[in-house]
Image: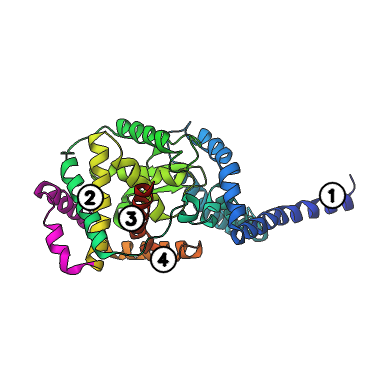
């Protein structure tokens, strides 16, 4: 092969290296403008992608999120050191960084991120939005408080594997009703080495879309663990919206006969309902809150104090701002406030189920 042909081949490979991710990003952009295309992708392509990625990641006990972070540090810091030591040309290092910048969003959106462009919850679930009704909502909250009081169970210790199996069983049982693909891969719960930092930021768990991994922070108390795990598993099943994941976690946990899973579901769900109640019926909030059993109130206080001691306000605020921007960039108009929007979904869902 002569020098001219080698040069042309090298130029062709360089063009492909940049053109391929650019074309795929264009495809993602088109899907972001056409919710039906994104829905088709998540319903028919994503399950295969999730199955493939999770089959690979479940074989290893460590978190690939940590591996990805390490690779990022090596690329930046190690590359700069190599450039300074003249072991690598600056142009080569810069080119490698540029290709990564192109391929990372492609990987993100095709591995899971397309879920942000799906039709909203009401359209997918064929549930009508209800007109806000103060009296109805107050009754709705009171019903949940009654169920919460009945569901109370001491949770000083619990079996994480047992909790995991129960939540998987519940998703398997209710996935058709909730219109979720199942099994859609294997959800092996992992823990990141960055947990100390995540704890200071107040992060209880997250989903790593690059390797289809469910991550849960072991710092959280037993009362919060089942709901958080169910929330992250909802992400893995193709749900992007935080309010929707809270909705699925609430339905799955409160429908369970496992005492600890059920209690965790009602504990977290009722806290969201109470927050909304304070804004809707501030005059009735104190009276209704007073209906909560003292043992449950003690758990709420325990959870609040547990995190208050660990969270660093500066880090937590910075994380909240970054995540708020991330959510808004991905069509989540309410940003980080969307977590609390689960109350509307619960009311709409309950009304639709009653009407059937």
Of labels 3 and 1, earlier in sequence is: 1
Give the SS element for disc 2: helix
Marks 3, 4: nearer the viewer:
3
Give yes or no for residue 344 being in the magenta stretch. no
Residue at point 59% right, 59% down?
A: 32
Q: Which residue is mark 3?
A: 347
What is the spatial separation of the Cα atoms under label 1 and label 4, in whole angstroms? 53 Å
Task: Please name whichever residue, 225 or 102, is drawn nearer the observer in this view of the structure.
Answer: 225
Label 4 crowd bin: few (<14), some (14–19), many (20+), radius 10 Å = some
Which contiguous range is marked in magenta?
A: 281-309
Where residue 69 sits in the image (x, y, percent)? Answer: 47, 50
Of labels 2 and 1, earlier in sequence is: 1
Label 3 crowd bin: few (<14), some (14–19), many (20+), radius 10 Å = some
Residue at point 23% right, 48% down?
A: 267
Label placed on residue 334: 4
Of labels 3 and 4, earlier in sequence is: 4
Label 1 crowd bin: few (<14), some (14–19), many (20+), radius 10 Å = few
Residue 313 as seen in the image, left or right of residue 22: left
Residue 193 in view (yes/no): no
Q: Which residue is mark 2?
A: 144
What is the spatial separation of the Cα atoms under label 3 and label 2, in whole angstroms? 11 Å
């Amino acid at each position: 092969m002569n020098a001219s042909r080698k040069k042309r081949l090298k130029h062709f490979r360089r063009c492909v290296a940049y053109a391929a991710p650019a074309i795929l990003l264009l495809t993602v952009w088109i899907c972001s403008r056409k919710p039906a295309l994104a829905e088709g992708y998540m319903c028919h392509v994503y399950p295969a992608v999730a199955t493939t990625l999770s089959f690979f990641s479940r074989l290893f006990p460590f978190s690939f999120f940590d591996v990805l972070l390490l690779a990022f540090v090596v690329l930046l810091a190690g590359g700069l050191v190599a450039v300074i030591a003249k072991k690598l040309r600056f142009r080569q290092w810069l080119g490698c960084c540029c290709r990564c910048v192109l391929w990372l969003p492609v990987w993100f959106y095709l591995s899971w991120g397309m879920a942000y462009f799906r039709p909203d919850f009401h359209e997918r679930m064929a549930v009508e939005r209800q007109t806000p009704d103060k009296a109805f909502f107050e009754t709705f909250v009171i019903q949940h408080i009654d169920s919460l009081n009945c569901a109370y169970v001491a949770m000083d210790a619990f079996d994480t594997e047992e909790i995991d199996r129960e939540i998987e069983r519940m998703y398997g049982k209710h996935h058709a009703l909730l219109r979720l693909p199942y099994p859609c891969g294997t959800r092996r719960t992992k823990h990141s080495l960055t947990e100390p930092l995540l704890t200071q930021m107040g992060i209880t768990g997250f989903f790593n879309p690059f390797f289809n991994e469910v991550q849960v922070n072991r710092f959280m108390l037993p009362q919060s663990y089942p709901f958080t795990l169910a929330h992250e598993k909802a992400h893995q099943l193709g749900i992007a919206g935080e309010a929707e994941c809270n909705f699925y976690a609430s339905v799955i946990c409160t429908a369970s006969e496992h005492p600890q899973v059920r209690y965790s579901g009602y504990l977290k769900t009722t806290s969201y309902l109470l927050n909304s109640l304070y804004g809707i019926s501030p005059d009735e909030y104190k009276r209704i809150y007073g209906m909560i059993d003292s043992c449950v109130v003690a758990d709420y206080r325990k959870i609040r104090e547990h995190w208050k001691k660990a969270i660093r306000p500066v880090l937590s605020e910075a994380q909240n701002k970054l995540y708020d921007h991330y959510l808004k960039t991905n069509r989540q108009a309410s940003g980080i406030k969307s977590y609390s929007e689960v109350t509307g979904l619960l009311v709409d869902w309950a009304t639709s189920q009653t009407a059937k």
